[in-house]
Amino acid sequence: MANVFAFVETRGTDVRKVGLEAVTAARMLADKSGGGEVHALLLGPPGIAAKASHIGQYGADSVIVVEHAGLANYNPEVATATAADRIKSGGYRAAIFSTSAQGRDLAPRVAARLGVSVVTDVLSFEIEADSIVVRHPMNIGKVIATVAIAAKPAVIAMRPNVIAPAQNAKPGKV
């Protein structure tokens, strides 16, 4: 049973679809690894906490909310420090981001701070023994690479629109 971290992207006080996709992907990975929990991180301006219960409906068992007026727009330094510290202290098996403009900036920063590699543009993943095996396109999509990630935590950035946000029956705690 390994817990999985998900970074929920926002724009202002709105949760982006790619954020819900990241939570759904994290839920799928946690279920495949034996039923661990999904902990989602939600950063934003005052009022963003109202969206936390909505994120729980997409598979997050726990939603960590950080509200501050300075987070109305994406702040890479704050997001990197907060996500990396949470991942390090939480002992997660994997951290899921989105391969959006924000995710392409944030995921490598977090991976560098944690001292691990990042795999971006991920299309799918499986659990094999002690590794997470991901598939992602290379060479302008002409080749699909299969990469086994044994490092912990595995930092993965999912390609947008490959996993549809799926609602979960149980609400998460904030």
Image (cartoon, rainbow, N blue to C red):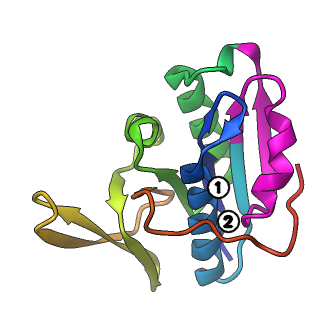
Mark 1, residue position: 91
Q: Is residue 60 visible?
A: yes
Left or right of 27: which side holds 119?
left
What is the three-letter code of the residue carrying label 2? Asn
Q: Residues within 10 Å of mark 2 (few under 14, many from 20)?
A: many
Left or right of 131: which side holds 174?
right
Q: Are marks 1 and 2 in contact (CB under 8 Å)?
A: yes
Residue 71: x %, y % from top left: 66, 21
Placement of the N terminus among the 4 image quadrants: bottom right
What is the three-letter code of the residue carrying label 1? Gly
Mark 2, residue position: 3
Residue 151: x %, y % from top left: 42, 61
Residue 34: x %, y % from top left: 66, 83
Q: Is residue 112 visible?
A: no
Q: Is residue 64 magenta?
A: yes
Give, as a single range, the part of the protein colored magenta.
42-69
